[in-house]
Image (tube, grey):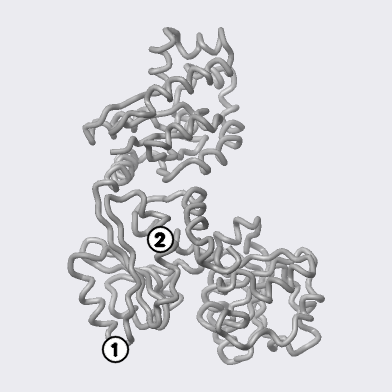
Amino acid sequence: MKNIVLIGISGSGKTSMGRRLAKRLSREFVDLDSLIQQREGLSISKIFEERGEEGFRLAETEAIRAVSDSRNAVIACGGGVVIKEINMQLLSQNGIIVFMSRPVKDILARVNLNARPLLRESPEKLYELYRQRLPLYKKYADFAVSNKGYPAKTLSQLSRIAKFEQREMQLAVIGDPIDHSLSPDIHIPSIGPFFKSFAYERRRVVPEDLSRWVIQVRGPGIDGFNVTMPHKEAILPLLDLIDKEAEALGSVNTVVKKGGKLWGYNTDGEGFFKALEHMGEDFKNSAVTILGSGGAAVTIAMKAAAKGARELHLVARNRDKAHKICQKIVRLYDTKCHLHPFLDSEKNGNQWGSRIIINTTPLGMKGVKQDFPSFDFMNRIGKDSLLCDLIYSPARTSFLIEGEKRGLRTLGGIHMLIEQALEADRLYLGVEIMREKAYKRIIDNLTGKVEGI
């Protein structure tokens, strides 16, 4: 079994929870700071006093070298272990890295920091250290576990992660057609490495067989499945419980088996929002333009409104469908919604006042002959605008290429596809899988499989 390696800021509970986890799992517990003291014959404070922080970091790396070949241990690391990349390389070779997350204000209120040399004189420095190190914790962690005063829940989450290696997991994606789906190419590298065995298959399910499929998966075998067209709406009455967001959308893309019941979720909107966040953008107080009026347009409009968009502009050929989306938005959220004709007016572009413009139509998709009749509207939008396309094949559509020619920022659909899959994986696992390492594994696996990656 791989080691469970706990990282996080000082006072986040790595030692206390690590010791409890090791006891529960009958594993060896290694407190890295204690090991350093044993090896050096000095207290941590004395090492800092005599050798400075750099001297301590050298001793820390040597202690990690001594334990990195071990197996089946729980290792609690010091808060600064992530500063040196070599430390994390050594610990990752034979370990699953878990970020113990705890609010700094809770740590300062409840933890005695006098024994920690970097914090003894100024506990408030913990805020600055956390700000500096948080990107590193996110970079190196495989999973994150919150430690906010519910130790039983924290311990349960840690135990769950530690037992993945003993589990077999089987997932699937259903649809008709399904051969084109990239889901296996995303989910397998995302979470497959953590399990004893892992399978993710494409299953063609025609509409008339959907009920039979749902009955079948209630038996042993499949732990959950993703849902694509044409089943996202039809599957709702066949499930036991529906998440609030999926219910509001009237659409499910992820089904998780829990306690013998089938739970339905929709991760599309959150996936797009996460992709947007990584571009440094946010829906809050923004004006957002959505091209199209289909199911994807509904999903994005609902998420934008829920996240505090100031106003929405729907640019669509089907005015009736667009009007229904606006009615739903106005009924559920305090968000203004405006309708516009589909790119056949010289007013398109300067009329929207939007910095975030999202194409939800199939125009430009591989295999679709039609494309945008004109891209002149791009000449009338702000130079700081972000153009987003939900299409992922090709990775760079004509919509994005034309935007780039005009110096606009762009976001391709492959990013939403990956982010929504990561959201589904978090539901399947019941724990927070960290993005950076999983994202890199996915992109590496998609290279050469998707045009433009």
Image check: 315 left or right of 307?
right
Residue 441 in view here? yes
Give the image quarter of residue 36.
top left
Image coordinates of residue 278 in percent, x first then y, are 60, 55
Q: Check the image and report above or below for 152 versus 296.
A: above
Residue pictured at 51% horizontal, 39% vertical: 137
Q: Which quadrant, please, contains the N terminus?
A: top left
Tell me the amino acid under the disc marked 2.
His
Tell me the amino acid under the disc marked 1.
Glu
User: How many C-alpha atoms fall within 10 Å of the one at disc 1: few (<14), some, or many (≥20)?
Assistant: few
Q: Which badge, 2 or 1, is on the more N-terminal residue?
A: 2
Image coordinates of residue 435 in percent, x first then y, are 49, 51
Pointer 1 residue: 208
Q: Check the image and report above or below for 337 versus 82.
A: below
Q: CA distance from mark 2 to mark 1?
A: 27 Å
Image check: 158 left or right of 411?
left
Pointer 2 residue: 187
Q: Secondary structure at mark 2?
A: helix
Residue pictured at 32% horizontal, 75% vertical: 203
Image coordinates of residue 242 in percent, x first then y, are 35, 71
Q: Nearer the viewer, mark 2 or mark 1?
A: 2
User: How many C-alpha atoms fall within 10 Å of the one at disc 2: few (<14), some, or many (≥20)?
Assistant: many
Give the image quarter of residue 304.
bottom right
Q: Which quadrant, please, contains the C terminus?
A: bottom right
As rendered, which of 309 and 380 lies closer to the eye? 380
Image coordinates of residue 64 in percent, x first then y, are 43, 25
As rendered, which of 142 and 445 lies closer to the eye? 445
